[in-house]
Amino acid sequence: MTTDNSHFLSDQIKSLGESATLKMSALARELGAQGKDVISLSIGQPDFDTPEHIKDAAKEALDKGITGYTPVPGLVKYREAIINKLKRENGLEYNMKQIVVSNGAKQCIANICLALLNSTDEVIIFTPYWVSYIEIVKFAGGIPVTLKAPIENDFKVSAEQLRAAITNDTKLIIFSSPCNPTGSVYTKPELEAIAAVLRDHKDIFVVSDEIYEHINFGDPHTSFASLEGMYHRTITVNGMSKGFAMTGWRLGYMAAPEWIASACAKIQGQFTSGASAFGQYAAAVALDSDLGPTRAMTAEFEKRKHMMIELLGDIPGFKVNDPQGAFYIFPNVSHYFGKTNGSDTIIDADSFAMEILNNAHVALVSGSAFGNDNCVRLSYAASEDTLREAVKRIKTFLADFT
């Protein structure tokens, strides 16, 4: 017999939402354990192995005994590699005290919010957003303010929307480009227009989440901190998970004004201390090495993207855009809301995702988790055969809904 003592939990943890992507992955695993053949397109993880030269570097570090505690802000070797990368690829100059290495980019964002936000501070979040932005902001005591952009605008917030949303309480802006969940990429002129708005508001800071930087199919990536007047107000967040297929290594980093970096290192020192030593050693090698494996992976993702656009476009009622980065498709499926096949009725994006999981045995994520109630997110980080089978199942199941 078990006793539910959850009433002892803090109000703060009770109000914290569960990650929808992780929840859907767990539900898919449960169905799989029941013997169902489930195709999971719900998790944001490249289906490529970490390149051999990076794994070899980790083995070398282990053989050298590089296994102890690391400085809280990161190994010197890794921070130097980050500094060189940011200068070489992004045109940004940083010193060692401006770089903080964390246990994934998610921890970087949490550190930033905990370091900057007070209870009356508003945080403008470009929507659709990555699932954890809202919950991290709320947990840190801030007030989330969502700016929504529909599929017709390629899911990109305009400078005019931003200008209208800014108040005297606005402290922070958070966005990702390339974006999770939409794959949309803000062009340099679009970012310049946003920067022009912010030049009129000197006390607002920007978290530019650039974790998908290398999975970009269009114009060269533009770092927000490189734009006029934005360097001293931008915290650039990046990491190894996506571009280097190193999700399980848990290595993110941030580049920021020194006073912000120092505050984030202070928080991290009390929560987790530094990231793994041999992982950072390998990550330094990754940043200093040729990007051939990353480019090959990106080329494969772009090929799959075109295939998915074609396949999903053949499903009646689906609205699909052409994302220029990441490895997600975010179709509008509101055509099916209120429709029934006689036994099941699709009410909204949440029920759409659950119907597809339980009946077509394909796991995807409701757009409500990302701030858009009309869409669902599908990851195409899977083989072409798997993706074709997944879309076939979805199309077959939906054919009976009228």
Image (cartoon, grey):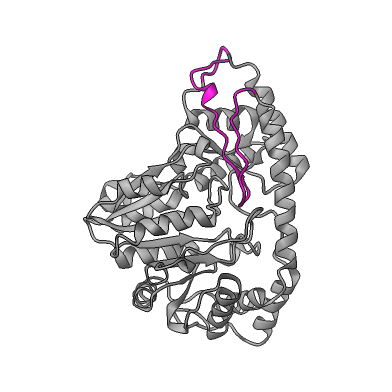
Query: On screen, 313 above or below 212?
Result: above
Residue 278, picture quadrant: bottom right
Q: Is residue 299 left or right of residue 127?
A: right
Instruction: Report if residue 377 lies within the magenta region.
Output: no
Query: On screen, 283 above or below 159?
Result: below
Q: Say which of 229 and 389 sits in front.
A: 229
Quadrant where the C terminus is found in the figure: top right
Instruction: Return the residue found at the far right.
Output: 385
Query: On screen, 63 above or below 328?
Result: below
Q: What secondary structure predominates along the stretch shown in magenta?
A: loop
- Residue lying at 57% horizontally and 84% vertically, measured from the top left: 77
Residue 385 position in % (x across, y down):
78, 40
Q: Say which of 11 and 72 sits in front.
A: 72
Query: On screen, 365 above or below 314?
Result: below
- Residue lying at 47% horizontally and 50% vertically, measured from the top left: 130
Residue 104 visible (yes or no): no
Residue 261 position in % (x across, y down):
39, 75
Residue 136, picture quadrant: bottom left
Q: Say which of 130 and 4 sits in front.
A: 130
Q: Is residue 49 left or right of residue 45?
A: right
Residue 25 position in % (x across, y down):
56, 45
Residue 327 position in % (x across, y down):
63, 49
The number of numbered discs placed on residues in the rendered structure image is 0
Quadrant where the N terminus is found in the figure: top left
Which portion, as a residue range, is magenta?
316-345
Residue 350 visible (yes or no): yes
Q: Say which of 170 and 350 sits in front.
A: 170
Q: Is residue 191 left or right of residue 378?
A: left
Instruction: Return the residue found at the far top.
Output: 342
Residue 161, picture quadrant: top left
Instruction: Report if residue 322 lies within the magenta region.
Output: yes
